[in-house]
Amino acid sequence: MVWDYLEAPAPLGRLRLEADDTGLTSITFCSAETAAEPPAQPHPLLERGKAQLAEYFAGERQRFDLPLAASGTPFQRRVWAALCKVPFGVTCSYGDIAAALGQPTASRAVGLANARNPLPIIVPCHRVIGASGKLTGYSGGLTRKQWLLAHESAS
């Protein structure tokens, strides 16, 4: 059950954070059509998430310290945990993540799990690029992925 949500400003457009009783469950990029009035008193966890994202965008935070409660298959959760180990400002390939999981032939499955990451930015799926070094898909669009990578390389 979702407690509530909170929308937060970001250089990439508004973000909507959602949480349940165990942690953050999703972050989505809002469009003008989906933007909504925030609840009168959002849960403190959502306020913490908003503050940590603001610190990240200000170049003051490289790692997030929040309870996460993303729904996914066991494999997806393993991929998302591996993504959290990719250091700030560093990129890797889908094959690198597959190898880190002990499944070197699973790069396509890693790509699918990466695409279903419900907590972009906090679970840094934007740090995963193609084996050729080219940018590949991102739930927020390649422009946002490019911005996030440039932001991290400049910080």
Image (tube, helix red, strand yellow):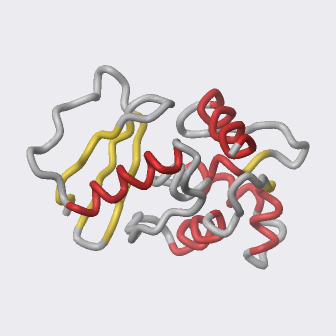
Percent across and percent down for residue 57 are: 52, 42
In the image, farthest residue toward the left = 40
Q: Would you say 61 lies left or right of 97 here?
A: left
Q: Would you say 108 lies left or right of 36 here?
A: right
* Residue at (47% x, 54% y) in the render: 119
Count every numbered label the image shows and give the total.
0
In the image, farthest residue toward the right = 132
Percent across and percent down for residue 85 are: 67, 69
Percent across and percent down for residue 41 are: 11, 51
* Residue at (87% x, 49% y) in the render: 131
In the image, farthest residue toward the bottom = 102
Q: Quadrant of residue 145?
A: top right
In the image, farthest residue toward the top = 32
| Residue 140, above or below 53 | above
In the rendered image, the quadrant that contains the N terminus is bottom left
- Of residues 39 and 1, the one nearer the viewer is 39
Q: Would you say 39 lies left or right of 154 here?
A: left
* Residue at (77% x, 46% y) in the render: 129
Q: Would you say 151 lies left or right of 52 here?
A: right
Percent across and percent down for residue 38 are: 17, 39
* Residue at (55% x, 58% y) in the render: 123
